Amino acid sequence: MTKRDTTAATTSTAAGGGPRLSSEDRAAKGRAARTAVPRSAHGDFEPSSHRADPMDVIERQSATRLQELVPIRYGRMAESPFRFYRGAAAIMAGDLAGTPDSGIRAQLCGDAHMLNFRLLGSPERNLLFDINDFDETLPGPWEWDVKRLATSLVIAGRENGYSDRERAEIVTSGVRGYREQMRAFAGMRTLDVWYARVDEAQLQAVAEGALHTRGRKNVSEALSKARGRDSLQAFEKLTEVVDGRRRFAAVPQLITPASDLLASGDREALEDQIREVVGRYGDSLQTDRKHLLHQYSIVDMARKVVGVGSVGTRCWIVLLLGRDGEDPLILQAKEAGDSVLAAYAGPSEYATGGERVVAGQRLMQAASDIFLGWQQTQGLDDVERDFYVRQLRDWKGIAEPARMVPRGMRVFASLCGVTLARAHARSGDRIAIAAYLGRGDVFDQALVRFAESYADLNERDHQRLVDAIASGRVTAVSA
């Protein structure tokens, strides 16, 4: 067989079976999508006349959650438009469903706002910049993630008092980073795309080339701080010694040891349930990591309130010890339901919410937590619930938008765009997406308009929550 014949054979059939388009055909598909859905059309946004009441959406979610925690969720969302936005992924999912899309799909984060991009530790003990939260992950139109990221940048910029021009430059930087990186990925070998990542050296290089002295110092401090946020740090901060035994320390409203939640009989049943989740979830790990997990013993557990949008879902932290009392591992088992995108993008292919989250995270992240896995269990109320499990802290560094000057947020936005492009390129048709986006900034400028329009809507939705609290429709507490 000639070299030409070999190339034709390998491009006609995918390894998993079925036909496979050539690179030229994939690029043509992306360019053709511009005719059906012009890139400039992404800038046009008007909420549907049939749009669901945002308070109805929030309250429907709250109905399935631990009711004693729901007021904390409302309190956090009411603090500011940005905090509201973080908890309003379900509202935006309905709005995005009515916006133009190119017809090209990828695995989505589902909640790609700027604070879900952060520093994380790889299994090789390197710091990476990556996406962190995958509670809503599901395949869908790639544009949805980009629009959620762009809007978060506008909302954060408004809270910092940035001008219209400064916000436009920040959004443009983020979307340009996505577009240019996707075009770079379109020309790369598939394995090279898979191995791509933003590591500590690249972050330092970006800081040196784009930031002033103060910005470079902030990056160095963030890298150093992230390395200290691990199980040992959590162990010292979250636990105490009681009667000679290490236990989670209670933090009013936020961390409640299992021993404080229920009466004796129910408490023992709850503890057995959590032990079962941790014990059985090891089956979802690689065999070497399952072996590692079994070298630890469970010594305590507590309920923890996490995030903004997740408040009210069941979340447990579990303290395990290895060699001795100073060899800790803290796992977080978090409830996983249906993605907020499912009603619009289609149901998950996975039987459980936990597996959906884990599969999406492994597909989109450059490197995932070695303890990331899932399990389903029956609660004390006889309801089957899905959980995913990971380390509570593993070198995490979180951005602080309020400390950013416009230049710093532009650089951060670009890093987010580059990272999101890499995540989408692993699962979606990077060649078609790149061809759709093109070389010019038409899509970039369209997203500036979209993000400003949606930020206006988000402010109105936030005010609806504030008014609902004031009227007594819902109760909110600060925590």
Image (cartoon, rainbow, N blue to C red):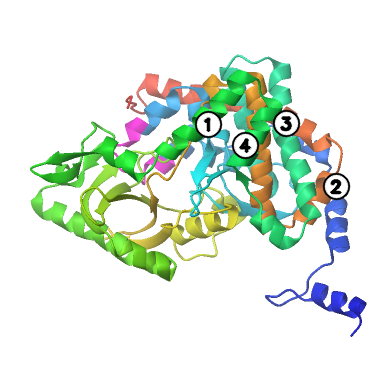
Mark 4 to mark 2 CA distance (whole Å): 34 Å
Mark 2 to mark 3 CA distance (whole Å): 22 Å
Closer to the camera in the image, 337 or 51: 337
> In the image, is residue 66 part of the stretch drawn in magenta?
yes
Hey, which quadrant is residue 474 in on the image?
top left
Of the image marks 2 and 3, the number of the one nearer the N terminus: 2
Closer to the camera in the image, 102 or 135: 135
Does residue 321 appear anywhere in the picture? Answer: yes
Amino acid type at mark 2: Arg
| Label 2 Cα crowd, 10 Å radius (few <14 / some 14-19 / many 20+) | some
Label 4, on which residue?
Answer: 203
Q: Secondary structure at mark 1?
A: helix
| Label 1 Cα crowd, 10 Å radius (few <14 / some 14-19 / many 20+) | many
Image spot of residue 406 (x, y percent):
65, 20
* Start-end of magenta stretch: 60-72
Label 3, on which residue?
Answer: 173
Label 2, on which residue?
Answer: 34
Q: Secondary structure at mark 4?
A: helix
Which mark, residue 85? Answer: 1
Amino acid type at mark 4: Leu
Q: Are marks 3 and 1 in contact (CB under 8 Å)?
A: no
Image spot of residue 373 (x, y percent):
42, 60
Pick the quarter of the image with the N terminus: bottom right
| Label 3 Cα crowd, 10 Å radius (few <14 / some 14-19 / many 20+) | many
| Label 4 Cα crowd, 10 Å radius (few <14 / some 14-19 / many 20+) | some
Above or below, 51 against 345 in this view is above
Does residue 44 appear anywhere in the picture? Answer: no
Of the image marks 4 and 2, the number of the one nearer the N terminus: 2
